[in-house]
Structure formats: C-alpha cells, structure tokens
Amino acid sequence: MTHPARDLLKTTTATLAPDPHGNPLVPRIAQGTAPRSTLAALALEQTWVIPADRRAFEHLAERSAATDPEAAAFFTTLAEGEALAGERLTAFARACGADETAEASYEPLPGCQAYPAYVAWLALNAAPADVVLALTANFSAWGGYCATIATALRERYGFPDEACAFFDFFAEPSPELDRLAARAVEAGLDEGRLNETRAHGYGRLLQAYEASFWSTLGEPTS
C-alpha cells in the first residue's frame, strides 16, 4: 500500500536537508568551544523567536479552521508546543548568565530574526497545507541541532537537566505531530489545496533563514 503523503514528507525533507557542514555554531557547541556569551545570545534570540512563532501558528490555525481542519489541528499542536518550550527557555537563559535585565535590554540580531519574520509572512500569505509541508521538512534539521546541543550542554558545559529542557523538548521525536502533518498533507493532496512546487519554495527559504540564524550567532564578536 502506498502512502503518498508520508512519501512526500519524506522526500521533501531529504531534498531540503541542509548542508551538514553549513552550520558553523552547533559543532562548536558540541565540542564545548563556543563561549557562554554565545549560548546566552542563543537563549536571548529564542526569547524573541518562540512567542513570534507561537502567534504565527495560532494565526494559521485560525485561518484554516473552517476550510482545512487537518492543517488547523497541526498548527494548534505546534502553537501549544511553542508555549511549552517557552516555559523551559528561562532556565537555559539563566544558566548562561542572562538575567531579566539582560533580556529586557537585549537587541535581537536581524540575521537571527529573519526566520520568525518569514514564518509570520507564511502565516499571513501562504496556503496552510503548503506551510505544513514546508515546516515539517525544516523541523527535521532543527530537531537534530537541538539533540546535539542538549548533549553538549550536559557533557561540555555541565548544565543541569532543567537548563537543557528547552532543547530536550525539540529533540524528542513527536509521533503525534508526524501523524497530524501526514493527515494535513494527505488532505491537501486529496482536495487540491497543496501546491508541491510552492511548498518546496517555502521550505527552501525556511532552511535559508535557519542557516542565517546559526551563522549570525556563530560570527566572531569584536
């Protein structure tokens, strides 16, 4: 029996997989050579990314609720996940030395915030089924980065479990989210709501902005 939706998700994820040598920062974190100031910047950038993505996913869920309930369920679950991740972020920030004053005064970097800005653009302009496919392909790389970072924070930096929980959350496989993505893509294919070429284009840009996030943080500071 064929599973066109799952096959499409698998092939799109493989096609859009980032260059394994294209992320300058995560290998440095894995080796323990990234300074804590860079880890603090990672935490502070995420204090901007997480709530922005949550609101974008909530908007996508609202947009698709009436006409594309499968996509709406996917985006609702994503938004709930972002809320849970946000609750775990503070412990990481504090372990890096970023307190409430640092959070309040932090000026986010354009190269890091291009990703959530584009997610917001997708929330306003893209067909929800296309966004499901594009995001799911991107999440595979993000989850792998988080798994590497979670291990390194414990083994290289001596962070406690609480400070690693943000990355543990995203590194953990989510069969339920995979199921919802497959259902949304299947419905999009069956009902002609999914444009594979357009979704691939969205995914390509998401991966580019993901790369921008890591390369910006990985730049040497003067």
Image (tube, helix red, strand yellow):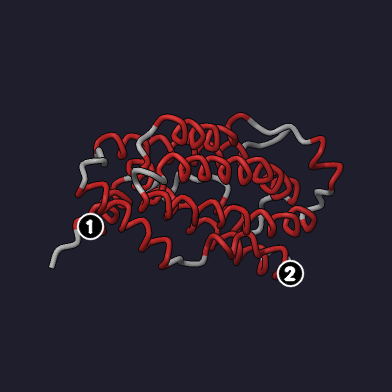
Position of 136 relative to 107 (above/below): below
Q: Quadrant of residue 7?
A: bottom left
Label 2 element class: loop
Foreground: 72 or 29? 72
Query: Is label 1 or label 2 in front?
Result: 1
Q: Residue furthest left?
A: 1
Alpha-carbon span between mark 1 and mark 2: 39 Å
- Of residues 219 and 55, the one drawn nearer to the viewer in this rendering: 55
Q: Nearer the viewer, residue 4 or 69?
A: 69
Quadrant for the N terminus in the image: bottom left
Report which residue position mark 2 lands on: 160
Question: Which of the 4 quarters of the picture holds residue 199?
Answer: top left
Residue depicted at 38% across the width and 61% down the height? 178
Look at the numbered discs 1 and 2 and tell me whether their residues touch, using CB distance below 8 Å: no
Judge whether 114 appears above or below 35 on screen. Answer: above
> What amino acid does circle 2 point to?
Pro
**Label 1 amino acid?**
Asp
Residue at (46%, 66%) from the top-left corner?
A: 173
Q: Where is mark 1, residue-wise? A: 7
Quarter containing the C terminus: top right
Q: What is the secondary structure assignment of the residue under circle 1?
A: helix
Q: Position of residue 186 (x, y in %)?
A: 25, 54
Give the image quarter of residue 52. Answer: top right
Horizontal side of 27 relative to 154 (left or right) equals left
